[in-house]
Amino acid sequence: MSNSISQPTLYVDLDGTVIKTDLLFESLLLLLKKNVFMLFIVPLWLMRGRANLKHQLATRVELPVALLPLNPEFIRFLEGEVERGRNIVLISASSQLLVRKVSEHLGLFIDAMGSDPDHNLKARNKVTRILQLDPAGEFLYAGNSADDIPVWAECNEAILVNCPKALASQVPHENIQHFDAPQSTVRKFCQAMRPHQWLKNALVFLPLILSHQVNEPGLLLQACIAFLSFSLVASSVYLLNDMLDLNSDRQHPTKQNRPFAAGDLSLAYGFLGAPLLFLLGFGVALLLPAPFLPVLLGYWLLTTLYSFLLKGLYLIDVLTLAALYTWRIVAGSAAIAVVTTNYLLAFSFFLFLGLAMVKRYTEFLNLRSEGKTTVQGRGYDVAQLRTLAAIGVASSLIAVAVFAFYINAPATTQLYSSPIVLWAICPLMVYLLWRIWSLAREGKLDEDPVLFALTDRRSQLIAALCGLLIWLAI
């Protein structure tokens, strides 16, 4: 390797600098998605050093380098430097195997080097390697972490990419360039928690409402605690799910903007945040009656199983989603120690099965409009659109029929002074579900019909009318 006389060589870090993400975490997620039980082997590899861990992971996964999120401003800078004739070398603490794959894909570097099984090319080790190549110390270096400070201390010019202000103030250099300012970690972490999805957990209040005990302050408080507990545990699974779905999300027109998929939030926050939210959710649940805990644990186990396995199975995935919605109602019953009727459980299951079918139908209708037939990680293709629509419409109609049976049930007639008023809810539900399916067929529906129903004005009006009718029936 020979440096240009007029331009010192630019040495460039990979993780967080060229790409927004970290290949160690990306590789670990790919391994766990392939076989979750490898989690027990990883500590044994780590005991022999981080370099060995990186090598073991790199030899066992196929990293889709073309999907890795890049720092766009810095990439444009590198392309300009290549045009001006500067030699650029990719040097990273990631495994040599993966570093070379990324280098070959981008085609910007004259050489690429990374950690081998015995040596972790990081901090002082990286400085030593660079000075072996450039003994005079005439070089530029681009990085993004505190581990790069020893390298910046030796270079002619420091280039900071995606670097926090607190770290930038520690760089021992006057000649500094900045690229790709980092996103707010707090804001992106809150976004990854998907607080808008907490609206679904409002189903835990349904048993309290239908048992006509909303005016009981103690029970209302218990339902609120159940809502908070369920939301925290749900967010822990959302973090896990988004980490496991990185590659499929990066190929999705809207999901590619999720914090982990876009590289705007470090995967380290997912590895720490998911268990922390899980523990916090169960800690809050200790304030509720004992039967609530196994219900919450069952919800977490099923959602985790869904993230690892069930979401890729044809029809099993939508059945699981419907069951999870219904599980929220069971949790609400456990939180206030009331018995949920089979009518309510059946109604919920078929209603949300229909909405889950709408979700899949919309996803694959959008897929067809993009000229694609399948999506990674899903057990469907666009040829099954008719089947999805048929099952979804049938499930929606069954839900309305179950509600009609509920109105005539002896327990219902005893609970309401004017149960006949409840019949007016049936045509409202039929209209709402018909509208959702019509918009889906026209390609005008968001891919989450539940959130659509919660935010759409007509849907809100229908929900308000249904609430009024229930009140009048009491």
Image (tube, rainbow, N blue to C red):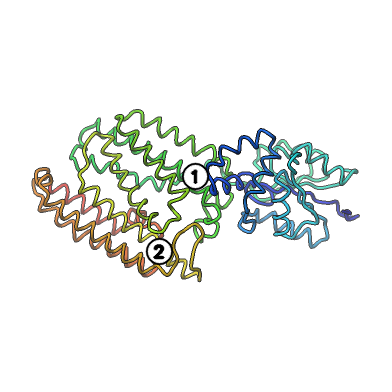
Dot 1 falls on a residue whose secondary structure is: helix
Q: Is residue 38 left or right of residue 171?
A: left
- In front of the other: label 1 or label 2? 1
Q: Is residue 400 above or below residue 344?
A: below
Q: CA distance from mark 1 to mark 2?
A: 24 Å
Position in image of residue 456 (x %, y %): 33, 57
For the C terminus, the image quarter is top left
The amino acid type, in three-letter code, at marker 1 is Leu
Q: Quadrant of residue 117?
A: top right
Residue at (43%, 51%) from the top-left corner?
310
Q: Nearer the viewer, residue 238 or 171?
A: 238
Q: Is residue 263 left or right of residue 124?
A: left
Residue annotated with mark 1: 240
Position in image of residue 187 (x %, y %): 52, 44
Dot 2 falls on a residue whose secondary structure is: helix
The amino acid type, in three-letter code, at marker 2 is Thr
Q: Is residue 367 above or below residue 140?
A: below
Position in image of residue 452 (x %, y %): 36, 57
Residue at (62%, 54%) from the top-left corner?
62
Q: Is residue 216 left or right of residue 234?
A: left
Q: Earlier in the sequence, mark 1 or mark 2?
A: 1
Residue annotated with mark 2: 362
Residue at (79%, 44%) from the top-left corner?
175
Q: Are marks 1 and 2 in contact (CB under 8 Å)?
A: no
Q: Residues within 10 Å of mark 1 (few under 14, many from 20)?
A: many
Residue at (10%, 53%) from the top-left corner?
420
